[in-house]
Every structure is written in C-alpha cells, then in structure tokens.
Image (cartoon, grey):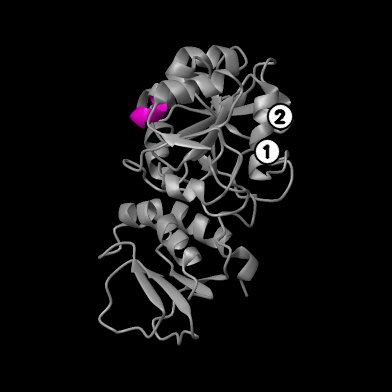
Amino acid sequence: MKIGTDIELAAQNIREGGLVAFPTETVYGLGADAFNTQAVAKIFEAKERPTFDPLIVHISSLQQLDYLFDKPINNLVYTLAEIFWPGPLTIVHRKNIIVSGLVTAGLDTVAVRMPSHPIALSFINQSQRPIAAPSANKFGQLSPTRHEHVVKQNMNIDYILQDNFGIMGLESTVVYVEGNNCTVLRPGIITLQQLMDVIPQTKVLNKTGDKNLPSPGLLKSHYSPKKPLYLLNDDEFVFPDKSGVILHAKKNKKLNVEKLIYTSKNCNLIEVAANMFSALHDMEENENIQQIYIETVPENGLGVAIMDRMKKAAYKYAV
C-alpha cells in the first residue's frame, strides 16, 4: 500500500486495474475502473462487501453519462445536475446495458454522481474512465473521513491519495428518477427541502432492508464502530465506567466519563456532520473506552441524514 499525493500515479493504478482510495467532499472512496469487472470485484473482496449492495459510479463530466445511463436519459437528471453537480448528490437511473451487473448488484439501474472535491475530479479525469467507489472502509464499519482512517482498515489497496481537507463527513444524498418522479433513497448532505425547491414532487422512500437494495447505505445496521454504540437523549443519564461520550454542544454540567468529544460548540449541524465519524473513530481507537454514547440531534434539515447514520451505527445495540 502506497500513500501520497501523486494524482497521475493514482490514475495509472486505476487504468491498470488497481484499487485507489481517494478523498471526496463526502467521505473517502475506494475506487476501481467501473468498466473493468475484475477490478470492481477487488472492491468487494477488499471491503468484504456483499455483492447485493450496489456501488456508486463517480464521473468528472456529463458526457460520461452516455456510457452509464440508458437512453433516453430522463430530463430530471439534467435538472438536478445543473443545480447540484459537482456535489454530494447521487442519481439512480436505468443503466446502459454495458454497465456490469457487479456494479449494480444485478439491478437494471445504476447510481452515479459527480464529486466536487478538486482532487477527486482531477483523479477521475486523469483516469480517463468512470470510477466505481463505495466508502473506503470494511463493510458495515465506520466511514473514513481521513486517510489515516483508511490505513487502519488494512485493506489490499494499491494507492491512497492523501488529502484530509474539504471533507464534509457525511455520504451523498441518493435519489431515483423515473418519469416525472424523484424519490430520495438515502438522506445526505443535500436535504429534502433543497430537492423539493427544484423538483416539488420529490418524495422519500420509507423502506430499508437487507436484500435487493436500490441504493448503497440502506441496510438497517451500517456505519458501525467495533465497540457498542448507544444513542443519548437523556441529560441525567449516569454513564458506566470506561464510557466515551460524543456531544454536539457545550454543557455546563461536568460529566464523569473516560473521554468527552464535542463535534460542535453549539450544535451546528454542518460541524456535527463533518466531525461525527472522526469522533467515532477516535473513540473506537481509544483502548480505555469500552462503550460509546453519542448525543442525538433534531431530525430536520441536515439532522435527518445525521440521525440516519447514527441509528444505523447503533442499530445492533438498540434496546
């Protein structure tokens, strides 16, 4: 595993069928040539990811949609792209027949987005092909927001593009377009209200499950640390010994805990989103901590996506 800032070397690894971890404005991605089935298979092997969970394909220009989406391409794709691309929005659309079923988990749709992180765009452009890339972590574990988080996963990766700046810390919003309809499959940085401002008839998918997933990130348990994680909404809770606590606003009350991390001083949801996964990584790596508690946030606006990640991260320990 090599780590560096050489974008052309990273792109060369992609062209040669390798795996590259790269920064995006959401989280770190683990990329392979989307049209090289053997390279895509390496993603599933490295992440220990089940093949029923589809991947997101990353592009650097709208022209690449011609190779990924079935014709005619829905006009809503271009409506959304004009407002939100480059940026943290993934669009699911009927796939072109040449897109591998391994990328799409056998579905007749494919998920595509154009990231706004300058290194990601340059990397995709220099690779000269679309990049299939889930988050660069072992399946079901914490999403990586720094290259160090990728390194500790100890996956079989050819190159890690090093850059820890401009990462928002929350995965993209995923929408499915068909006819005149736009459906949010996964909440993310772009909120429902922002989407409705562009397409008023936008609705939200209510179903999650464990098979036949139309989008990544829909499993009931996901984004989890290796230690027990519990949601905290009680200011009077008495913490057991060796507890790590993550709060989102400064408190007057002193807490008797092993470690306390604030993601924000005043529950600024952009700061919470940016710092949440990093805080969970810190707690996971601390040998003195046996269990983690994380404060909930109001479920409106960006809080919907933040709570989506929290609930899935804590799902296996929910009472």
Specify whether 30 is left or right of 116: right
Q: Which badge, 1 or 2, is on the more N-terminal residue?
A: 1
- Report if residue 201 is visible in the image: no
Q: Position of residue 160 (x, y in %)?
A: 47, 36
Vertical side of 55 occupied by 300: above or below: below
The residue nearer to you, when weighing 184 against 284, is 284
Q: Which residues are magenta?
A: 116-121
Image quadrant in which the C terminus is located: bottom right
Tell me, for residue 44, which label it has, or none. Answer: 1
The answer to the question of whether label 1 and label 2 lie on touching residues, with beta carbons closer than 8 A, is yes
Give the dominant element type of the magenta stretch: helix, strand or loop.
helix
Q: Amino acid at mark 1?
A: Phe
Q: Is residue 22 left or right of residue 252?
A: right
The residue to which callout 2 is attached is 102
Determine which quarter of the picture holds residue 257.
bottom left
Which x, y percent locates residue 220? Answer: 64, 56
Q: Is residue 35 visible?
A: yes
**C-alpha span from label 1 to label 2:** 9 Å
Q: Nearer the viewer, residue 253 or 213?
A: 253
Residue 15 horizontal side relative to residue 37, left or right: left
Coordinates of residue 154 in the picture (x, y in percent): 58, 48
Q: In the picture provided, is 37 more to the left or to the right than 281?
A: right
Q: Kindly state the secondary structure of the residue where label 1 is placed.
A: helix
Q: Residue at x 60, y 50 (%)?
A: 206
Q: Nearer the viewer, mark 1 or mark 2?
A: 1
Crowding around mark 1 (Cα neighbors within 10 Å: few <14, some 14 to 19, many 20+) is some
